[in-house]
Amino acid sequence: METNELQRILEAYDAKLDSSIQLNKEALKRIQLEKSEKKTRIILIYRGIELLFFGIVVLFLGNYVVSHWSHTHLAISGSIVGVFALIALTGSIGQVALLQQIDFSKPLVDIRKKIELVNSHNLLFIKLIFLSAPIWWAYALVALDVFLGFDLYPHLDQDFVLRYLVFNAVIIVPVSWLFNKLSYKNMHIDWVRKTIGFLSGTKTGKAMEFLNEIEEFEH
Amino acid sequence: MPLSKKDSFIKLIDEHKKIIYKIVNSYCPNHADRKDLEQEIMIQLWSAFDSYNTDYKYSTWMYRIALNVAISFYRKEKKWSLKSDYYNEESIFIYGENNLERELESDQNLKLLQQFINDLKELDKALMLLYLDRKKHEEIAEILGISKTNVATKIGRIKIKLKKEFEKNTDYGNK
């Protein structure tokens, strides 16, 4: 199809539209435009609650580490869990910032990317769970101490502790590799797509696929 | 007498109604949902009307909002919509006595072109609609947020695809 031919088709199309459609002004007036003030998006409320929750957790863990400074194993465990809570808090702050920037009158690619980054937020938690695998013991020690007032560490056999430390050190490499693989840039890899879809739901999977499409479109 | 805000808005929509029609037609394959998309676009345009940036043309502003709404609608992202409870059953368009749908259906080239657009991915579809509306590469780049060179490259690729599609489906290639 040559450009001239395309132009001819388009002119015919526009002529048909010109002669066939009119704006239904009365219907437009009845849409109650005045009453359509921007409702606070539910998603912003969710992310706000999430931000507040992780903020409290980070403050609590900071206080926990300071007050258990003399018990090295609890202070280290508290610090490790605190770092993860801090990552989650940073993620929530980022989400709120993204939501504030979403304005439909801005360029399409930029806004679509921000929307899909919000839609794929669940993946951060999945990745944090993966990344927590080698240091699961930190969660266990802190949780038992906080909720049951029981310090497990002195009751553990030192050989058992050593074996687990070695095992967990070994799995750091594959877990970090997996952490990096679970990204929208790898959605073309079948197992990555399926894993993301399975662990974080179809919506997150679709958002990641669209992020990948946006990236391709930009370049 | 100066026009009220609402009258100015309606006048503006009237001048650019074909933009809305084409976007709704391309992003909403289900006829029954088209009224909802038309109204969601109107609501979003109205809510952004006060903050319209005069540095841009009205059509640029309108295309950005309408395309963003249409893509969210197409992807069924209801959380990005505004007041869906204010939707009513009417279309914002009045169709003339000549049946537009039937007329468009009977034009083989138009039908093929519409089908081609419908089958494109969301962002390519936006690019194609802008190109077919004879927008300059610069304005397309401004609406989409990509470089002018990228616009030119993508349009070139889509045109090749379109040519092949027409050759495959019509006897155009033999002429």
Image (cartoon, coloured by chain):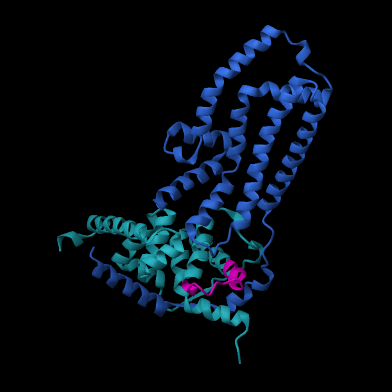
Chain colours: A blue, B cyan
Q: Position of residue B162 (x, y in %)?
A: 29, 58
Q: Residue at x 57, y 69 (%)?
A: B45
Q: Is residue A153 left or right of residue B44?
A: right
Q: How many marks?
A: 0
The correct choice, above or below, for A165 with respect to B175 in the image is above
Q: Is residue A22 left or right of residue B164?
A: right
The correct choice, above or below, for A170 with respect to B99 in the image is above
Q: Is residue A29 left or right of residue B96?
A: right
Question: Which residue occupies the extreme right position in the image?
Answer: A149
Residue nearest the observer in this picture, B71 or A145: A145
Question: Which residue occupies the extreme front position in the image?
Answer: A70
Residue nearest the observer in this picture, A49 or B9: A49
Residue nearest the observer in this picture, B174 or A7: A7
Residue nearest the observer in this picture, A32 or A170: A170
Question: Which residue occupies the extreme bottom position in the image?
Answer: B1
The magenta stretch spans residue A120: no
Q: Position of residue A133 (x, y in %)?
A: 61, 24
The correct choice, above or below, for B144 with respect to A133 in the image is below
Q: Residue at x 45, y 61 (%)?
A: B144
Quadrant showing the N terminus of chain A: bottom left
Q: Position of residue A103 (x, y in %)?
A: 58, 61
Residue B115 visible at all: no
Q: Residue at x 49, y 72 (%)?
A: B56
Residue range of the region highlighted in magenta in the rendering: B43-59
Quadrant hosting residue B160: bottom left
The magenta stretch spans residue B58: yes
Q: Position of residue A112 (x, y in %)?
A: 51, 54
Residue A173 visible at all: yes
Quadrant hosting residue B147: bottom left
Question: Which residue occupies the extreme left position in the image?
Answer: B175
